[in-house]
Amino acid sequence: MQVSIEPLRLEDARAIVEAEDEQTVRWLSEAKSTVEGTTEFIAQLARDAERGKPKRVFGIWLDGTFVGTIDFDPDVTDGLEPGDVNIAYGVAPSVRGRGVAARAVELICATIQERAVGKRAVIRTDARNAASSRVAEKAGFVHLRDVHITTETLEDGSPVVMHVYGRDLT
Ligand SMILES: CC(C)(COP(=O)(O)OP(=O)(O)OC[C@H]1O[C@@H](n2cnc3c(N)ncnc32)[C@H](O)[C@@H]1OP(=O)(O)O)[C@@H](O)C(=O)NCCC(=O)NCCS
């Protein structure tokens, strides 16, 4: 199994849409994607990067096939500390459970380190998203703390809890 991460290209838009399921929408993208909207999203990312924004999105490739996305963004600050670089990811349902996400996280940590983007990689994951927490643990992250999200509540009125995981890169 060969996993690699490559900078996202406009022509990856269709593969992103095809790799999406209800879990991706729930935990990552927040809305169902279209090829047109995703193409514009990728173009906007490139324009933002040209203007100096630090967020970078990569395609995850498994044995030559596009199977998901992973990004880093040091501009995410909610629940984080200066020097933290937030990582988020999604993998197509057909290849889940084979270690693809954990390997992609290791690869993006190496990229963050090489480019000296920040001091610590962090993953914030909803406490209900056990698979994502497991990815963080498998990639060598340690649980730092839990934070309560104030903008969302569970059905019983209790706050949504996010686990924050970190891995030092220095
Ligand atoms: C989270 C996600 C990226 C994991 O991708 P993946 O390639 O399957 O991840 P890995 O195979 O590296 O690891 C998944 C781990 O979670 C475990 N897992 C999967 N579903 C689980 C569940 N419901 N409860 C507990 N553990 C679960 C797997 O068994 C595996 O652990 P193991 O290797 O110890 O057996 C994928 O499920 C996904 O795209 N989900 C939707 C988007 C998302 O949640 N993104 C995270 C936002 S930060």
Image (cartoon, rainbow, N blue to C red):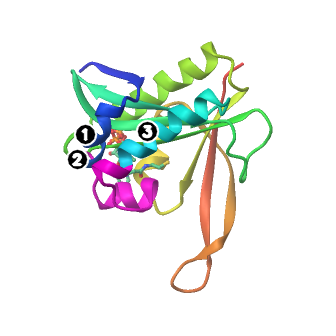
Residue at 54% x, 86% y: name it.
156
Q: Which residue is mark 3?
A: 42
Tell me if label 3 and label 2 are in contact, CB under 8 Å. no
Task: Characterize the local packing of mark 2: few (<14), some (14-19) or many (20 or more) Cα atoms within 10 angstroms.
Answer: some
Q: Residue furthest top?
A: 114
Of labels 3 and 2, the one closer to you: 3
The secondary element bearing badge 3 is classed as helix
First in sequence: mark 3 vs mark 2: 2
Give the percent coordinates (x, y) of residue 124.
Answer: 59, 49
Residue at 68% x, 66% y: name it.
148
The secondary element bearing badge 1 is classed as helix
Residue at 30% x, 54% y: name it.
34
Give the amino acid at mark 2. Answer: Glu
User: Is residue 90 shown above or below 116?
Assistant: below
Magenta residues span 19-37
Tell me if label 1 and label 2 are in contact, CB under 8 Å. yes
Give the amino acid at mark 3. Answer: Ile
Task: Characterize the local packing of mark 1: few (<14), some (14-19) or many (20 or more) Cα atoms within 10 angstroms.
Answer: some
**Nearest the eye: 151 or 170:** 151
112 in magenta: no
The circle on residue 18 is: 2
The circle on residue 15 is: 1
Q: Quadrant of residue 6?
A: top left
The circle on residue 77 is: none
Q: Quadrant of the C terminus?
A: top right
